[in-house]
Amino acid sequence: MFARLSLSGAALLLCADAFVIPAVLDHQAPLQGAALTDLLAEKAHALSDQIGLTTTTKQSLDTWLGKEEAIAVDRLLANIAPSGRNAQHAAPGTVIASPSKKHPNYYYQWVRDAGITMATVVDLYVADPSSDLSRTVLLPTLESYASISQKIQHTPNPSGDFSFPNLDGLGEPKFEVDGSPFTSNWGRPQRDGPALRATALMKFMRAYNESNPGVWDSRTAASSEDLFGRLYNAELPARSIIKADLEYVARHWAESGFDVWEEVRGRHFFTAQAQLRALREGAEVATAFGDEGAAAYYRQQAARLEAMVRNDFWDARGGYLRATRGSEAEHQRSGMDCSVLLGSLHGTAAVDPAYPDPAVFPPHDDAVLVTLMKFVKDQRDRYPINAQPSEADDFAADDQDPLRPAGVGRYPEDAYDGYAAPHPGAGNPWFLCTASVAEILFRTAQRVNETAAVEVSETGWDFWHGLVCPASSSSPSSVDSTSDCPLSWHRKQYAAGDGTGVVETAQRRLKSLGDGFLAVIRKHASSDGSLSEQFDRWTGFERGAEDLTWSYGAFLQALWARQRVLSQ
């Protein structure tokens, strides 16, 4: 096998040529074992005969993470106007998905991506509200985002306009960077954007209030001139930004829309999770503003939505959470999807939930964890690059570890290769999906550390067994008949210091495996630290939209989850 390489542009062309594989292979079941290893070895040998290979300087994962954090923050902010160097021609507050303007063209503001990104910007602000960065860049950026959000809310577009009570125009998924509507054909409506935007702005409002004591008390009631009044005002028809988004979510959550990947219409786990969080947090905000009627309405709709989420997405036969219900995708796809992991993450606050209700399918939930395990196994076997030995292997128990770190893509049947969609199965691993696995593992580790306990349900048995006893069979009868595995099918609760070592092993392994998925990102990131959308299933080199904003945000959230674990 060969080490990670630093290649020039010319060498990359040779690399791509050396890794030409008959396309028919992508239609077959994932290659495994010796066949896959031999194929990669053959291709690596052909590549090394054509170009000089230079291994990158080896450094510890901790060292690389420290450097990459600064790079990711810089490159994420570079994609946000007005200060971002890649967004100089965009309206202030606009978040461009990527500076790539052709092959592929991602030079737009997606409402979903912008909301997710600005939630990360709020986290940067909260870390040090009085810093020069916060005062000169982050706070003006957040205020500009609120302004551009209000503008595009009121902009008529192919999905509709701002007419109350339907507010159909809020379902429009993306806009030009100057705030004007995107009018070409697209998968619309998409109903996750208003929920994610509302959540980001509610998070900003709370952060601003905490860092500026006295501003809330000194504000004039029902004023639309101050920041709080622009963000939320109780008046109907809704004109304030958050209020309008919450009204849209409350009135449309039961309707179908396009998924996070903009491909299929139906009811989607990711969308529902984002909507549920927005309604729950929105009820608390409405109460704070004395809007009790709205608070009751949002709680009522949240309860109905929660029942749908709990009942609709668990696939009892497959033993995992499905991404979509109510569309042709339900019959044409397995339902395993990175968007389920993203839905769990973005549907649950990482720190200090802003509502009193128990989270639905949080990252530490057994249904989420077993879904993660089955999805990771599929993706590990599906992409040939995952068979190449790497530093990430050092974080697994062995080659047969059911949770061995690997590059993770969107879903098994993915046809999009970063530039086109030649056929089902042509997709690649994505940086943001790989980071989402790491974040879930770190957030689960945080939970285990906080509770000093592990509770193993029947649903989560395969995950916890694979985590604690990776070398033994997960069959209940096999586990109970051997002393090698401290888990028992008949025992569901374990505590730190109980003599079994289950909690202690889980704590160690969750952190180690999370590190392993970050090591996968390190392996495939460019030598300058940049992260594109995808990395090639065969060669491992970046492809698709360059400097994808969501890739940096997902990496940062995973890294910060790791830092919280280390600080416990």
Image (cartoon, helix red, strand yellow):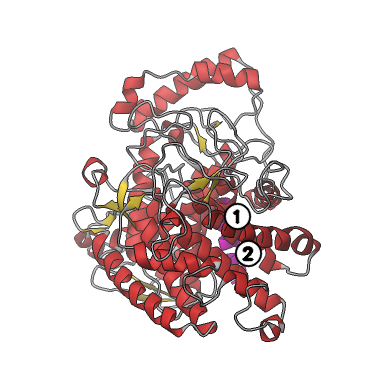
Left or right: where 156 falls relative to 413: right
The residue tagged 2 is: 123
Residue under numbered circle 1? 556
How packed mark 1 is, by other alpha carbons closer than 10 Å (few <14, some 14-19, many 20 or more), is many
Q: Nearer the viewer, residue 239 or 546?
A: 239
Residue positioned 43% across, 68% down in the render: 247
**10 Å neighbourhood of mark 2: few (<14), some, or many (≥20)?**
some
Q: Residue at x 67, y 86 (%)?
A: 217
Asked if labels 2 and 1 touch by Cβ distance under 8 angstroms, the answer is yes
x, y (%) of residue 290? 51, 85
Residue 470 visible: no
Residue 558 at x, y percent in the picture: 55, 56
Q: Main secondary structure of the magenta part?
A: helix
Tell me if I can see residue 327 in this picture.
Answer: yes
160 or 485: which is nearer to us? 160
Image check: 49 left or right of 436? right
Inter-mark Cα distance, 1 to 2: 10 Å
Which sits in the foreground, 75 or 405? 75
- Residue 288 versus residue 145 in the image, above or below: below
Amino acid marked by disc 1: Leu
- Amino acid type at mark 2: Asp
The residues colored magenta run: 555-568
The stretch drawn in magenta includes residue 350: no
Secondary-structure class at tag 2: helix
Q: Depth check: 40 or 181 in front?
A: 181
- SS assignment at label 1: helix
